[in-house]
Amino acid sequence: MKLPVPLTLVLVVAVATLIAYSALRSYTGAKEQRIHDLQASSDVQIDVLAPLLQKYKLGSGIGTTERTFSEFVFAQVAAGKLPEAEAKQALDSISRSGLGEPVLTSRGWVMPVLAGN
């Protein structure tokens, strides 16, 4: 059975519309997730990381030989610059965020999502 041209055209347009909608939905979902991650990383940066570094005058971490934030924090604990309880609390808060550990950039320790921009 041969379909009439207008019906074929309607089917082609419907399929194209569904594909375009699916692609747009996927793109929008990825952007929404990115925005969520940026907001969450900013919260951790502002509420956990920056206060810890400022309160104990740990600087930005630039010039440190430690490769990870955990190593940096525990080196500060070992040097007597940071209480162990607060170090563990900060690391737990960062870990619970699920956003990864801060990375050392040219501006200091920054949450990985923020460092990627």
Image (cartoon, rainbow, N blue to C red):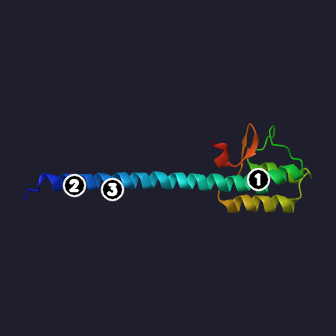
Residue type of the residue flagged with mark 2: Val
Q: Which residue is drawn at 48% across and 53% down?
A: 28
Instruction: Say what secondary structure mark 1 lies in.
Output: helix
Instruction: Say what secondary structure mark 3 lies in.
Output: helix
Residue closest to the eye, 21 or 97: 21
Numbered disc in front, either 1 or 3: 3
Report how far apart the C-alphas of labels 1 and 2 lie in the structure.
53 Å
Q: Can residue 67 be seen in this view?
A: no
Neighbours of disc 3 within 10 Å: few (<14), some (14-19), many (20+) = few
Quadrant for the N terminus, please. Answer: bottom left
* Residue 91 coordinates in the image, percent (x, y): 76, 58
* Residue 67 coordinates in the image, percent (x, y): 74, 44
Asked where in the image residue 64 lies, by quadrant, the reply is top right
Q: Please indicate whether residue 79 sits to the left or right of residue 22 in the image.
A: right
Residue type of the residue flagged with mark 3: Leu
Residue closest to the eye, 82 or 8: 8
Mark 1 or mark 3: whose residue is earlier in sequence? 3
* Residue 40 coordinates in the image, percent (x, y): 66, 56
* Residue 15 coordinates in the image, percent (x, y): 28, 55
Q: Residue at x 79, y 59 (%)?
A: 90
Q: Mark 2 points at which residue?
A: 10
Q: Name the residue under label 1.
A: 46
Q: Mark 3 points at which residue?
A: 18
Q: Please indicate whether residue 90 sits to the left or right of residue 78 in the image.
A: left
Mark 2 or mark 3: whose residue is earlier in sequence? 2
